[in-house]
Image (tube, helix red, strand yellow):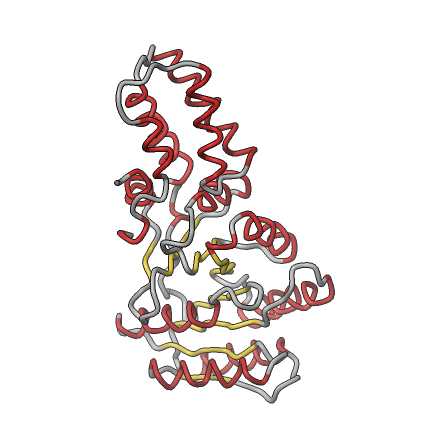
Amino acid sequence: MRILKGLFGKVDQLLTGRRPVDDELFDELEECLIQADISIRTAAKLVDTVREESRKKRLRESEQIKESLKDILKRILVSGADATLAEPKDKPTVYLFVGVNGVGKTTTIAKLAHRFKSKGYRVLLSAADTFRAAAIDQLEIWADRVGVELVKHRPGADPGAVVFDSIQAAIARGIDAVIVDTAGRLHTKSNLMEELSKIARICRKALGRDPDETILVVDATTGHNAVNQAREFAAAVPLTGVALAKLDGTAKGGIVVTIRDELGLPIKLVGTGEKLDDLDDFDAEEFVNALFET
């Protein structure tokens, strides 16, 4: 995740050197964290925790505060087994991808299909975004480019039927992974969110279990709006994690901390470029260290 280097530049500058630890420092630190796209609530919580640790450990210099902050960020971002994307295990393993239009969802799906195929898995893409004809065509282009199978219906068809047929086809063909593309639903449209819930129920009917992963794709450059989207989607379907697309020099990075802290959702995948190989597993320690690099 070298592309993230220095995204907490102002925080790093504030805490570099031998500046005394006082209330003014903590106030400026909270302001810098908010400017780095961390929510007001999470920023206040971070500063309160750093302040408490500095009191207990008798930290006297800003460099010590920086190391304390890095440790706290890593504790927030690191979790158990849920932090990594499930590998294809039970045939077929189903990955449901959700998110609004324009966040990079279809590209993320193609990158994941490429990753799985490179590991020797058989992959099928499910074109359940029937709302736009162009979405079906786009997914078909990616399927051909990556060299994986595709199940599609006509534009305007029932997305649930596409998902059901995709799972049945995967069972019949011995497919390892089914990756489902859904319409770019606006998180303010309750009827579309209900349709998404229906797709999840159809997965349960066809598989006898929930989708193995339900991943929300958000655009890292949209800041707090992405957090609001995550809240809305989590209310419609049981999300298992987040894929951050476009986490490059235009993003400030704080959204990662806010999503994990306020919503309890692990960041599982990170898109760092336009190429098919530009999809990384999220590494909390590497991420935090990169934020403070200069």
Q: Position of residue 184 (x, y in %)?
A: 59, 69
In the displayed structure, 55 sits above or below 67; it is above
Q: Position of residue 221 (x, y in %)?
A: 47, 55
- Which sits in the foreground, 186 or 32? 32
- Left of 120 or right of it: where is 27? right
Q: Quadrant of residue 163?
A: bottom right
- Which sits in the foreground, 60 or 237? 60
- Which sits in the foreground, 244 or 171? 244
For the view shown, which residue lies furthest in the bottom direction? 154
- Left of 199 or right of it: where is 283? left
In the displayed structure, 121 sits above or below 190; it is below
Residue pictured at 55% horizontal, 47% vertical: 224
- Left of 273 or right of it: where is 215? right
Q: Position of residue 249 (x, y in %)?
A: 36, 54
Residue pictured at 35% horizontal, 62% vertical: 87
Quarter holding the C terminus is top left
In the displayed structure, 252 sits above or below 20; it is below
Q: Quadrant of residue 117?
A: bottom left
Q: Position of residue 52 (x, y in %)?
A: 44, 16
Q: Quadrant of residue 262?
A: top right
- Total numbered labels: 0
